[in-house]
Amino acid sequence: MRRPIFALGLSALALAAAVPSLAQPTALAEKTATAKPVDPARSQQSATARHAMVAAANPLAVKAGVDVLKAGGSAVDAAVAIQAVLGLVEPQSSGLGGGAFMVYYDARTRQATAYDGREVAPAGASDHLFLDENGKRLPFAEAVLGGISTGVPGAIAMLDMAQREHGKLPWAGLFDEAHRLAQDGFILSPRLAGMIASKAPQAAAPDAKRYFTKPDGTPYVAGDRLQNADYARSIERIAQYGASGLLTGPLAQQIVERVHEGPRPSTLSLADMANYRPHSAPALCKPYRVYLVCTPQAPSGGPGLQIALGVLEHTDIGKRNASDEKAWFEFAQASRLAYADRDRYVGDPAFVKVPVEGLLDPEYLKGRTAEIGEKAGPITFGMPKGAPEVGPDATHEPGGTSHIVIIDAEGNVVSMTTTVESIFGSGRMVGGFFLNNQLTDFSFSPTDDDGAKAANAPAPGKRPRSSMAPAIVLTPQRKFVAAAGSPGGSAIQAYNLKVLVALLDWKMTPQDAVSLPNLVAKGSTYSADKFPQPIMEGLAARGMPLSTSRGEESGLQAIIATPKGYVGGADPRREGVARGF
């Protein structure tokens, strides 16, 4: 039973019979299925289930979540267990030292709530946080490895709040599987092993090198067993005290001391840690076709994703399919327009005016759609109603993130994106887990040449803008249809847009939808996976030559409801699976 040091808080299966079945493949998918055998790896990642389902980035985490659901736990209970395991077995992406956004759907009330566990800057931070002594922007690697990159972690506090409101099982028991795996050891996956051997500066940081080096001096590789007694002890404290076990006491002290060490020390204090509070509010739910798409509010990537959907609402992409180059052109143009507006206007609404109502006004979006044209030309931000005067953005958004989708036996749903920001966060560890480098999600330049402040400029107590945009789709009667999301740094917006278009417009199965090639169009840059040659040639002819993506690949997870139960899929680019019962 939890003994918190301080308080952090303020039916039947829901099926999608009221809308066209999302489990029917497109003609493209049917043609592909008959032309060659099904890829065994993809078939192992997807699943169907009658009662409940989990899709997450690592099979060990998925198992922990399914076990909680089988024991009668709620979707939020399962999310706690999954996050605890992911922080151990996928530390390059998320963990106890990171943050998260979550959308929760209550099947009884049919309401969608957004939970904000975004990290915050310490009270001692300034808008010059990432400028050097001469007023020049710090090199990104220097900023990431510095103590200044770490914000107060919020993922566990957010889960603590949500579990108090929607949990069914005792909090302490939700950490049992993570504790066992930390004590007994877990088998390193190929993806984690690849990150350990990568050229990322955090992988070469002293704490990471120490953790990932065996007693004989060689690095851990895929198939090795790795134990983490420090993580087990941290889990014990959080299991006993809730989020206050992390944000106060010895763990908080260790975090503060660690970020004060070395180059670019932080001003983070114990008061900053103890004063952290997650947020909750009604989700940002907007219509798309015959559906309602719900995402978190700013400073998440929810508004940006909603802008892109609002633009596509005024195109004919729904009458096309994934083999149509015009569909992908419309997709890319909508992405460019949405990124331009998001980058200009979205920041922490507690500090800046975010003109969400103006950005999502149907007439404004209709006007933005008119800019798509037949060929790619220059695109800039628009001027929605209520737009403040803000300067240009200079934000780096590397990837080190994970996504979780859960539906429990009562039909309650969690869609949650969780992160430590970059690979292994800042590269600094305490208590067996990595600390985030989330503050590097702020704009490194606080103002433009004329002195206008960027919406995403750093400030004391401010939350940096995020691309994370977990989504839940409902019918107009607010019955559950689908849930999806992805990691991927700034590309998250494009990855999530792809899967929603594939599910809702092209009626693809979750596995086919997440497996589609990715196209990330931002400004004048068009990066993509390998598309069929006709699509590549068609887009090039429209002034949109595709280059091979160099950012973080997608890690999409998706679950849909059908009259027979649930169907889930996991991105073949990573190690995730969907499982249920």
Image: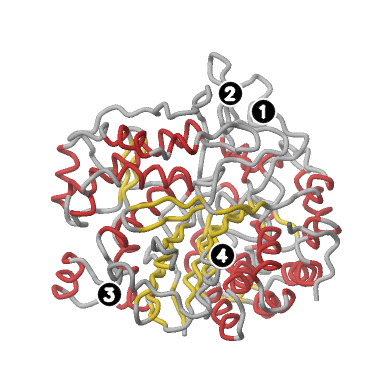
The answer to whether the residues at label 1 and label 2 have Cβ atoms under 8 Å apart is yes
10 Å crowding of disc 3: few (<14), some (14-19), many (20+):
few
Mark 3 or 2: the one toward you: 2
Q: Give the image quarter of residue 88.
A: bottom right
- Quick check: 461 left or right of 328? right
Mark 3 or 1: the one toward you: 1
Mark 1 or 2: the one toward you: 2
Q: Amino acid at mark 2?
A: Lys
- Quick check: 82 left or right of 571? right
Task: Identify the mark nearer the N-term, 3 or 1.
Answer: 3
List the residue tagged with mark 2: 453
Q: Which residue is at 80% across, 48% downward?
A: 275
List the residue tagged with mark 4: 90
Residue 182's place in the image compared with 158, above or below, is: below
| Of the pair 501 and 40, the residue shown nearer to us | 501
Q: Residue furthest front?
A: 477
Q: CA distance from mark 4 to mark 1?
A: 32 Å
Q: CA distance from mark 3 to mark 2?
A: 50 Å
